[in-house]
Image (tube, rainbow, N blue to C red):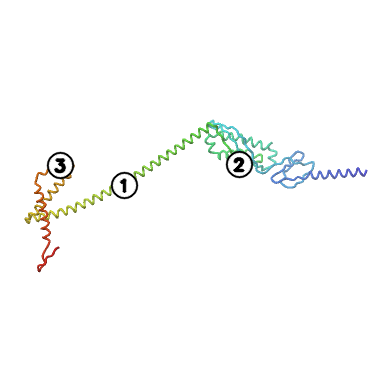
Amino acid sequence: MLEISTIVVILVAVLAIVLVFSGVVTVGQGYEYTIERFGRYTKTIKPGLHLIVPLVDHVGHKQNLMEQVLDIPTQEVITKDNAMVAADGVVFFQVLDASQASYEVSNLTLAILNLTMTNLRTVMGSMDLDELLSKRDEINARLMNVVDGATQPWGVKITRIEIKDIAPPRDIVDAMGRQMKAERLKRAAILEAEGMREAEILRAEGEKRGAILEAEGRREAAFRDAEAREREAEAEAKATDVVSKAIAGGDPQAINYFIAQKYVEALSEFAHSPNEKLVFMPMEASGVIGSIGGIAELFKDIGSSKTTSRPGGVPQVD
C-alpha cells in the first residue's frame, strides 16, 4: 500500500508541476499573444512572463507587431490608353491591434496582398502610360490611402506601398526611345539656331560699331581736311594779296610769277587727267623757262626787300 501511495503522490506532484509550467507563458519582444478561455477571446498579453489558468486558458494567436514587408507579384495592367504594362511592388505594414488582426480577418497577409493587387490594377488602369512612368509618387500615395483605409478594421497600419518596376511592352519602349531621340535632336537644333542667332546679333553689333567708328573717323578726317583747305586758302589769299600789291606797284616780276603759277597748275591738271595719255605743248619751252626765271627773280627781290639798314650804316636782316 505504501508503494502505491508513493506512486500516486509522485504522479500528483508531476502533474502539478506540469500544470504549473503549462500556466506559464513567455512573450517575446515585438509580439503579442491572444488568450482564449474555452475557445473565447479573453485578453491580449504583452512581452514578458505571464501566468494563465492551466487547462482553461490557452494561447489563441501569436501576432508580430514589428513592421513587415510583403512582396506584390508581377501582374499585367491595362492603362487608360489601352497599353499593357507589367508592374510589381512591395507593401510595408504593421499590426497595431493583435485581437483585431486575429479575429477580424482570416489569413491577414493574404488579405493584404489581394487587396493591394486589386487596387493596384484600379489605380494604374485609370492613368495614361506617360502618367504611370512619370508619377510613381502619386500612384504610391493613392494606393496607400486606399489600402490603409480598407485595413483599419483589421487593426493594421499600412506604412508604405512602393511600385518597384513598371515594364511597358517592347514596341512601346522602342517607340519611346525614338521619340526621346527626336526630342533631343529637336533641342539640339533649337540650341544651334539660338547660337547662330546670337552670333549674328553680335556680328551685326560689331559691324554697327565699326561703321560708327569709321563714320566718326571720316568726319574727323573731313574736319581736318576742311581746316587744311581753310589754312591753304588763307595762305593763297595772302600770297595773292602780296602779288596784287606788287602788280599795283608796277613790278613785272610779280606779273611773271602769277602767270607762271597758273601755267604750272594747268599743266598739273593735264598730267593728272585720266582720259588724256598724251599732252601736246604748242608753246615754246623757252617761255616756260622764262616764266620760272621770273619767279626766281621775284623771290630774290622779296628776300632783299626784307633786309633793312640800321642807323649808322649797319645792315639788319629780319
How crowded is the residue under tag 2: few (<14 C-alpha within 10 Å), some, or many (20+)? Answer: some
Quarter residue 279 falls in:
top left
Per the image, the residue denoted by label 1 is 210
Point out the image quarter for the C terminus: bottom left
Residue 181 position within the rendered picture, expressed as x and y whole percent measured from the top left: 48, 36
Mark 2 residue type: Arg
Which residue position holds label 3? 278
* Amino acid bearing label 3: Leu
Q: Dot 1 lies on which element?
A: helix
Return the disc, 1 or 2, that comes first in the chain's sequence: 2
At 73% from the left and 47% from the top, the residue drawn is 48
Which residue is identified by label 2?
A: 160
SS of the residue under disc 2: strand
Q: Quadrant of residue 58?
A: top right
**Along the polypeptide, which appears first: circle 3 or circle 1?**
1
Q: What residue is shown at x 79% (from left), y 45% (from top)?
A: 21
Please identify, in this view, whether the residue under mark 3 or under mark 2 is nearer the observer: 3
